[in-house]
């Protein structure tokens, strides 16, 4: 393992006006870390010689100094694929902050989603202490408490997890957040980073993670901030961004892309292992997203990829609603709980082979909950309402009567042949709609009923035969979809696994099924009868 020559080091481009590079301080930090030893695998017991990318981070963080003599950067966001030496770097920095940062009674915390995850960096740090006699003589390792104490300054490094932590009394000099993307919520992050280090001269919040899947998470928030700073869209002199990963448009099978995303490739992780993982992902599409996330550090929505958004976007052409007046259509109704999103999707079957299936969605949420939802979910419901993409009903619950009246009005404009609904969720409304003269059809949510139209939806999207006008709410839901597969290869949207709302897609699949079966003709006719089940 070779480290960067100090002669080759160029100070960070994020150095603020008035700040300078202090080589002595940077050398000190590098020397401390390189006095430690590796603890795992074939490197165990060998000196911790920093790799180029690791040394650059250490020199940037500990050598970029403000006019007042303190460090410029208080937050470092380092996003990098797995097996690059992430935990070792995090442990070394935790020890540096605890034992060698010149802080009396320093409080350094190692944070993770659960105690097991938080223990990973701690165990590496404890082993590093044991393998370094000068440090071992000055350090107490309290294994049961997951605490390391540096006795000369009475400083400590303490493990915390999102499962159990105290909200009071922190006087933080350093925090190492390992795998930030696994945090179940933002509670621990906010406690550790909002004001807890105000009494310290130069606290350091070191966030290190692989890309995640939840774009409403605190990790994605930090990722976006780092990306904006890297792209020159935002400026924050206290925030240090590092992202190693592939771009969305990059070819995930290109080995040059792998090298760009993995700075330790062929050092900490053999390229043969990456090749084997890529080959496996090629044979099994369900593994593709895991490969992209863990090996190429790409943010992917779900662990099983279903609808690639570039396929969905083929249907973005605007829809002339006036031209649909009087046309045959089929509706799908996903009536969520009274406080949730209710979706009604109309599907207009093509009148000839040149036409697409036209999709017109409608969504409702309670008016009083919008602000709460925006803050909680980080989803722009308020903006969508202003754009007319989302209807609201008065109060804090969805008023079904308002939806029934809306559907009744739609029935005067379009020839709604059937309304398909989830038999478990909308019994009363189905009766009311039946009384208004609509044909209502119960629709099972199991594999038998959902699989054929789900596969058909993918096929039509692939062919560019779904026109949805680029509706933002529906696109968001499509991007949220997680698919469950049974042993026979049948598929259906998985509401439990889909971390965000998919109601509109469920309604679309139900409506599409009825449109395919019945089309514009009377009596009803089904493409499934002719072709059998599609297997994609």
Image (cartoon, grey):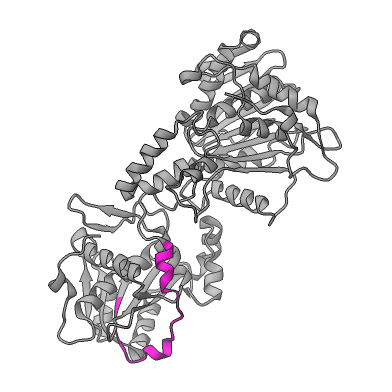
Question: Is residue 225 in the magenta section?
Answer: no
Q: Is residue 351 left or right of residue 67?
A: left
Q: Position of residue 178 (x, y in %)?
A: 54, 34
In depth, the one of 366 and 325 nearer the eye is: 325
Range shown magenta = 309-331
Residue 284 seen by the camera: yes
Quadrant that contains the C terminus = bottom left
Task: Please determine whether, in this image, residue 117 is positioned above or below residue 78.
Answer: above
Q: Is residue 126 left or right of residue 320?
A: right
Q: Position of residue 364 (x, y in %)?
A: 43, 72
In depth, the one of 467 and 433 nearer the eye is: 467
Residue 334 seen by the camera: no
Q: Is residue 381 left or right of residue 530?
A: right
In depth, the one of 133 and 2 nearer the eye is: 2
Residue 454 location, quadrant: bottom left
Residue found 44% across the figure and 53% down from its top: 301
Q: Position of residue 531 (x, y in %)?
A: 15, 70
Residue 25 location, quadrant: top right
Task: Please determine whether, in this image, residue 536 is positioned above or below residue 189.
Answer: below
Task: Please determine whether, in this image, residue 146 is positioned above or below residue 509.
Answer: above
Residue 92 location, quadrant: top right
Residue found 64% across the figure and 7% down from its top: 137
Residue found 64% across the figure and 12% down from its top: 135
């Amino acid at each position: 393992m070779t480290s960067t020559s100090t002669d080759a080091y160029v100070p960070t481009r994020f150095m603020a006006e008035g700040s300078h590079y202090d080589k002595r301080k940077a050398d000190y930090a590098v020397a401390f870390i390189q006095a430690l030893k590796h603890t795992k695998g074939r490197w165990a017991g060998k000196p911790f010689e920093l790799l180029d990318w690791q040394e650059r981070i250490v020199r940037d963080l500990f050598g970029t100094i403000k006019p007042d003599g303190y460090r410029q950067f208080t937050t470092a966001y380092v996003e990098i694929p797995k097996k690059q030496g992430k935990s070792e770097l995090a442990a070394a920095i935790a020890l540096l902050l605890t034992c060698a940062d010149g802080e009396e009674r320093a409080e350094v915390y190692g944070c993770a989603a659960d105690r097991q995850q938080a223990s990973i960096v701690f165990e590496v740090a404890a082993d590093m202490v044991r393998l370094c006699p000068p440090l071992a003589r000055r350090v107490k390792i309290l294994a049961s408490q997951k605490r390391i104490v540096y006795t000369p300054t009475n400083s400590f490094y303490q493990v915390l997890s999102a499962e159990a932590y105290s909200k009071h009394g922190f006087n933080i000099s350093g925090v190492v957040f390992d795998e930030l993307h696994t945090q179940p919520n933002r509670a621990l992050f906010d406690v550790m980073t909002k004001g807890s280090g105000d009494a310290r001269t130069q606290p350091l919040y070191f966030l290190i993670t692989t890309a995640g899947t939840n774009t409403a998470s605190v990790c994605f928030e930090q990722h976006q901030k780092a990306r904006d700073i890297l792209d020159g869209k935002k400026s924050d002199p206290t925030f240090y961004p590092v992202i190693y990963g592939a771009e969305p448009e990059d070819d995930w099978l290109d080995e040059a892309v792998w090298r760009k995303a993995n700075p330790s490739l062929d050092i900490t992780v053999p390229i043969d292992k990456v090749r084997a993982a890529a080959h496996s992902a090629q044979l099994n599409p369900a593994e593709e997203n895991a490969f992209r996330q863990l090996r190429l550090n790409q943010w992917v929505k779900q662990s099983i990829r279903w609808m690639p958004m570039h396929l969905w976007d083929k249907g973005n052409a605007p829809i002339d609603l006036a031209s649909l007046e009087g046309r045959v259509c089929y509706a799908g109704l996903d009536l969520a709980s009274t406080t949730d999103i209710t979706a009604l999707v109309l599907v207009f079957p093509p009148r000839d082979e040149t036409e697409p299936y036209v999709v017109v969605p409608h969504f409702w949420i309670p008016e009083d909950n919008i602000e709460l939802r925006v803050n909680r979910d980080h989803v722009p419901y308020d903006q969508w309402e202003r754009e007319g993409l989302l209807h609201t009903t008065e109060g804090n619950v969805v008023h079904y009567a308002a939806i029934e009246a809306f559907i009744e009005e739609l029935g005067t404009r379009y020839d709604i042949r059937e309304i398909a609904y989830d038999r478990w969720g909308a019994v009363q409304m189905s009766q009311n709609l039946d009384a208004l003269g609509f044909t209502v059809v119960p629709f099972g949510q199991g594999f038998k009923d959902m699989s054929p139209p789900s596969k058909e939806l993918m096929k039509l999207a692939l062919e560019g035969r779904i026109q949805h006008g680029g509706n933002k709410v529906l696109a968001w839901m499509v991007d949220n979809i997680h698919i469950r597969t049974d042993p026979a290869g049948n598929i259906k949207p998985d509401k439990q696994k889909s971390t965000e709302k998919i109601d509109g897609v469920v309604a679309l699949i139900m409506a599409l099924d009825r449109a395919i079966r019945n089309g514009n003709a009377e009596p009803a006719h089904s493409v499934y009868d002719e072709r059998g089940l599609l297997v994609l």
